[in-house]
Image: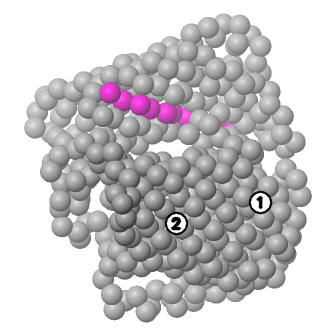
Amino acid sequence: MKHRSLLIVLMLICLSPLSAFKVTHLHMGTGNDWYTMGLGDNLDDGLSFGGHLMVAIDNLAFLKIDALGFTDRANTGYRYDQININLNSPLTFALAGITYTVTPLVGMTLAGDFDFERVQNNVHRGLNLAGLDLPYDNTETQYHLNLGSTLEGTFPLGWIRVGLQASYLHTFGRENSLQTVAVMKFGSSLTLKAGYSLMHNLTGGEAHQSMMDRLSGPTFSYYFDGGLVTNSWIFHANSGSSYGVIGIDVMQLFQPASYDHSDFFYSLDSLYDKFGHSNRSFSLAFGPIIIQTRHKSGPMKNDTEGSNRRMTVASWMMGYQKEWEATALVYPYLKSLWGFQRFNLYQPVPYNTLTEEIRPAIALEAGIKFGRDGQWVAKNNSYRPRISALIKYVLDTRTLKQSVESVFAPHIGPWIFLVGFGLDIGHDPH
């Protein structure tokens, strides 16, 4: 209770001076490591879960508060909680055709025991998952000053921008963070990054040292600003860990609409298989051409033995889509997709890969989109909910099914059926 009250007081102190200014963004999100995009493994370890708040003032100053739960079952057997409160203000200028953005940052980090273990285990109980009982490596609250800056330079290729970004963050008495990445931006909505991170532990403790090792090395990430809906994901190749956040920005409802037409679409959906597993999909569409990744990860619901085996079943596909107008509200659509299916089964602690295979796959998706493009708009984005059904055939699975764990075999196919719902977001970058 003491730490929960401390967090509330800190948030009020940070937010109260901002009340006199115009709030242009109020983004609230939740994060979890089951956002793997099919590349990472849902280890349920490392940066496991978190809550996120971002407030933008006149689009000039940005306050971010991140409450993060870290666990380290694999190495030290400890856990710790962390709260980051940072303020940054980007400065943008153009020189010789290149747009530069310098973003200084100041803030503070709190580390210790903030009772996030109870939050995690309450969520686990709600999902019928086993709880995680790990001791804290330090129960005393530690306070650290943050100072850092980011430098980015990009140049335009039409409404797409490409460039480089370098950032440095020093958390006094705790850690150093240095990252250099290549950047590609699709309008103001989608940012892709790929590069390298170096994390150095100063005096953060055993579990924190393990975390610095996990987060160092090659990294890939994206951030999608869909107006009302936001989504981000980061993957650390050395450790196989990943983390994603989905959130909402309620202030978009109060911004003037500037939408004219969609140059591309970003889609989120969740389709369910016969076991009740949610298969999460993320896709980009340019006209009729679509690129899509879909994944499910975590414990197998048909694994009645209650073992700690965990799976990742994912696909990376591209294809063609077509829709028709049935009524002013109902638009049936059809997608044909081709690509590859990944089957991964592992034991997380100690880590041991039991299965790692990739097979070609084809799929057909049909459903109904509701509303025409541009009918429901917030700022420069258009929103179309839909319901979907998918049938997929995975090639060359007969010998694979015979060689894997019996509880994993039903997840391999060759026929896979999914039904669920989704949201298409059309973005106007102009």
Please indicate whether residue 65 sits to the left or right of residue 356 in the image: left
Structural distance between the alpha carbons of marks 2 and 1: 23 Å
Q: Position of residue 131 (x, y in %)?
A: 75, 55
* SS under mark 1: helix
**Quadrant location of residue 65?**
bottom right
Residue toward you, 268 or 89: 89
Let me know if residue 57 appears in the view.
yes
Q: Which residue is mark 1?
A: 212
Q: Position of residue 294 (x, y in %)?
A: 51, 33
Residue interval drawn in magenta: 289-301
Q: Which residue is mark 2?
A: 151
In the image, what residue type sits under mark 2?
A: Leu
Q: Position of residue 74 (x, y in %)?
A: 85, 50
Label whose residue precedes the other's in the sequence (2 or 1)? 2
Let me know if residue 189 appears in the view.
no
Query: Does 83 appear above or below 131?
Result: below
* SS under mark 2: strand
